[in-house]
Amino acid sequence: MVTGASSGIGRAIAVRCADEGAKVLAVGRDEHALARTAAEDGRIATLRADLVDPGAPEAVAAHAVEEFGGLDGLVHAAGTVRRAEDFRETDDAWLDNFIQVNLTAGMRMAREALRHMIAAGSGSIVLVGSQLAHVAQPGYASYVATKGGITAFARALAVDAGPQGVRVNVLAPGVVTTPAAYIDRPDWDDLAPQVAGRLPLRRVGEPQDMAGPAVFLLSDDSAWMTGQTLIVDGGFTIQ
């Protein structure tokens, strides 16, 4: 099951998982975009859901189990970002919503997936964090707080879930050209080369760059890995 699968990183991961032979439930808020994701591979089923809604994570996980007979892996990629934030101007309503989308929804999705995985005796949960949980940048205070929270949560949950056969890890992207984060910026064409010039690999990331690492974390290739963060950022955080 992949959340945030309407576009960007979630969509790329859902398609790659299907390419690898998995049956995938792609979850998102945009029904038409989900249909485009499903059109990539016949192994992808879709479900429209807003994971902030009460009861939605429980219903989504139950749907996956009903659809496929079990739940082996979860990638929680749904989230939101706000650039150039002046935290003095962040009101309570916006802050509460941001925490609900980026932190609480991920915790709830992990909880519901965990219930099914423990019952089956195995599973892998991958929560999408961010490089900014490790090297903060100006103007991202709320985003960094929520991604830092989901990263710490994954470590704690890994300790609890490991004895029951369930692994929990974090995939932390760097600058990836998704519509929500960068492509919709009017200055992105000018900004992208500047950003690339600050990365050791000299290019910004594409959603597909996250797909292989996500499959690795889901699969038995990472069978002795839990509570860890895999940073995939073109080398930004090593400088």
Image: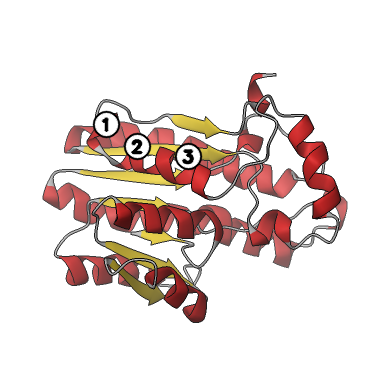
**Tag in front: 2 or 3:** 2
Q: Are marks 2 and 3 in contact (CB under 8 Å)?
A: no
Given residues 186 and 55, the one toward you in this image is 186
Q: Amino acid at mark 1?
A: Asp
- In the rendered structure, which disc, 2 or 1, sits on the residue that comes first in sequence? 2
Q: Give me the residue at 47% from left, 80% from top.
A: 31
Q: Are marks 2 and 1 in contact (CB under 8 Å)?
A: yes
Given residues 96 and 70, the one toward you in this image is 70
Question: Tag count in the figure?
Answer: 3
Say whether residue 166 is left or right of residue 131.
left
Residues under labels 2 and 1: Cα distance? 6 Å
- In the rendered structure, which disc, 1 or 3, sits on the residue that comes first in sequence? 3
Q: Amino acid at mark 3?
A: Leu
Given residues 56 and 35, the one toward you in this image is 35
Does residue 137 appear in this view?
A: no
In percent of width and height, residue 161 lies at: 27, 38
In the displayed structure, 44 sits above or below 80; it is: below
For disc 1, the marked residue is 221
Q: Secondary structure at mark 1?
A: helix
Q: Are marks 1 and 3 in contact (CB under 8 Å)?
A: no
- Which of the image's four quarters has the N terminus? bottom left
Colour pattern: secondary structure
Neighbourhood count class around disc 1 (C-alpha, 10 Å): few under 14, some 14–19, many 20 upward: few
Q: Secondary structure at mark 2?
A: helix
Q: Give me the residue at 34% from left, 35% from top.
A: 158
Does residue 181 appear in this view?
A: yes
For disc 3, the marked residue is 171
Say whether residue 65 is left or right of residue 237.
left
In percent of width and height, residue 179 lies at: 66, 61
For disc 2, the marked residue is 216
> Which numbered tag is attached to residue 33?
none
Q: Give me the residue at 63% from left, 26% from top.
A: 235
